[in-house]
Amino acid sequence: MKFHVTATSGSENPTKATLAFLHAKGAKEAGHDVSITLLGDSVVMLDPTIAKNIQGVGLPPLVELINYAKENGIPVYG
């Protein structure tokens, strides 16, 4: 199955910002094809300086999830 996850929240809401990458990781780990699109405020997460400071409540740091996406060939469009 193929999944496409879209994010619209950025650093102003770290929990929502992280969820797109977390969902994509879960789908990939379950053996599915997945991609991510960043729209609006979420595009700032592509900046490593900003990404390293984003961590949602009870969630892994965003940079860990971004690295997972890179290492596992999950396309990120933004």
Image: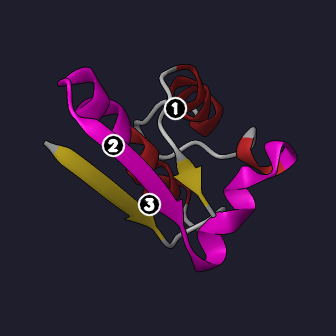
Residue 60 horizontal/vertical position (percent): 49, 30
Q: Give the x, y percent position of residue 6.
A: 41, 65
Is the residue 41 above or below the residue 68 in the image?
A: below
Rendered location of residue 76, percent (x, y) = 56, 49
Secondary structure found at label 3? helix
Q: Is residue 37 magenta?
A: yes
Observer-side mark, 2 or 3, equals 2
Residue placed under numbered mark 2 in the picture: 34
Labels 1 and 2: the sequence-earlier one: 2
Q: Which residues are magenta?
A: 23-49
Real-space CA distance between mark 1 and mark 2, rounded to the nearest whole angstrom: 10 Å
Task: Identify the amino acid type marked 3.
Answer: Lys
- Sooner in the amino-acid sequence: mark 2 or mark 3: 3
Q: Secondary structure at mark 2?
A: strand
> Badge 2: few (under 14), some or many (20 or more) residues near its Cα, within 10 Å?
many
Q: Residue furthest left?
A: 1
Q: Residue at x 50, y 29 (%)?
A: 73
Q: Which residue is mark 3?
A: 16
Circle on res. 69: 1
Q: Is residue 12 visible?
A: no
49 relative to 13 in the view: left or right: right
Q: Residue 58 at what x, y percent from top left?
A: 40, 36
Q: Is residue 3 left or right of residue 66?
A: left
Question: Residue 41 is drawn in which quadrant?
Answer: bottom right
| Magenta region includes residue 28 | yes
